[in-house]
């Protein structure tokens, strides 16, 4: 199973409009998004794509995601959202964080991943990884970083 890591920055006249634009940049704006906690299934790989391929799934499909997001409306305000992840033979974990600066976000993601590692008696492989998106607001501005698992069936 591949988990697609996507991200976007959006600007708009309103906070919701900028969030929709950020989802559009990641190409997840035409799906219904269901929030997951942060466990990566055994055997899954995380692939940094930037945006989903157009037409990958049907419009309106329900996608399972782990998402970090932030919106700002004050001119000059920094908005930052990121995901961190670590893999193990048994699976892995994502951590999400949003804040004002890239440095703060990176620091918190790595601390949270360290805590997650300590409470799981797993065979960890490799080093923690992060993807952080940052923007400075002019009008309403949103940043989004999301791990997209796959469509869910509601039947």
Image: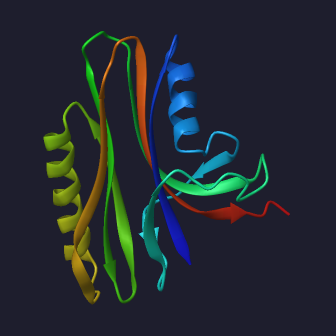
Placement of the C terminus among the 4 image quadrants: bottom right
The residue located at (25%, 84%) in the rendering is 124
Query: 38 or 2, which lies in front?
Result: 2
Give percent across and percent down for residue 100. Answer: 22, 30
Placement of the N terminus among the 4 image quadrants: bottom right
* Left or right of residue 108, residue 19 in this image: right
Q: What is the residue that sits farthest to the right in this orientation?
A: 155
Quarter occupied by residue 48: bottom left
Give percent across and percent down for residue 36. Answer: 52, 57
Give percent across and percent down for residue 74. Answer: 31, 10
Quarter occupied by residue 111: bottom left
* Left or right of residue 62, residue 37 in this image: left
Asked if residue 113 is positioned above or below residue 119 in the image, the reply reads: above
The residue located at (48%, 86%) in the rendering is 43
The residue located at (38%, 13%) in the rendering is 73
Query: 71 or 135, which lies in front?
Result: 135
Query: 130 or 94, which lies in front?
Result: 130
Give percent across and percent down for residue 120. Answer: 28, 79
Instruction: Count up the numbered dots.
Output: 0
């Amino acid at each position: 199973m591949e988990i697609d890591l996507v991200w976007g920055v959006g600007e708009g006249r309103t906070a919701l409009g900028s969030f929709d634009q950020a989802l559009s940049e990641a190409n997840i704006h035409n799906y219904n998004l269901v929030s997951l906690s942060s466990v990566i299934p055994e055997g899954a790989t995380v692939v940094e794509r930037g945006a989903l391929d157009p037409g990958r799934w049907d419009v309106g499909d329900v996608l399972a995601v782990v998402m970090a997001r932030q919106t700002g409306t004050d001119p000059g305000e920094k908005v930052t959202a990121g995901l961190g992840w670590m893999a193990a033979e048994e699976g892995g974990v994502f951590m999400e964080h949003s804040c004002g600066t890239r440095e703060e976000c990176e620091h918190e993601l790595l601390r949270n991943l360290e805590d997650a590692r300590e409470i799981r008696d797993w065979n960890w492989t490799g080093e923690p990884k992060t993807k952080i998106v940052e923007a400075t607001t002019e009008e309403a501005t949103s940043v989004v970083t999301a791990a997209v698992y796959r469509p869910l069936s509601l039947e």
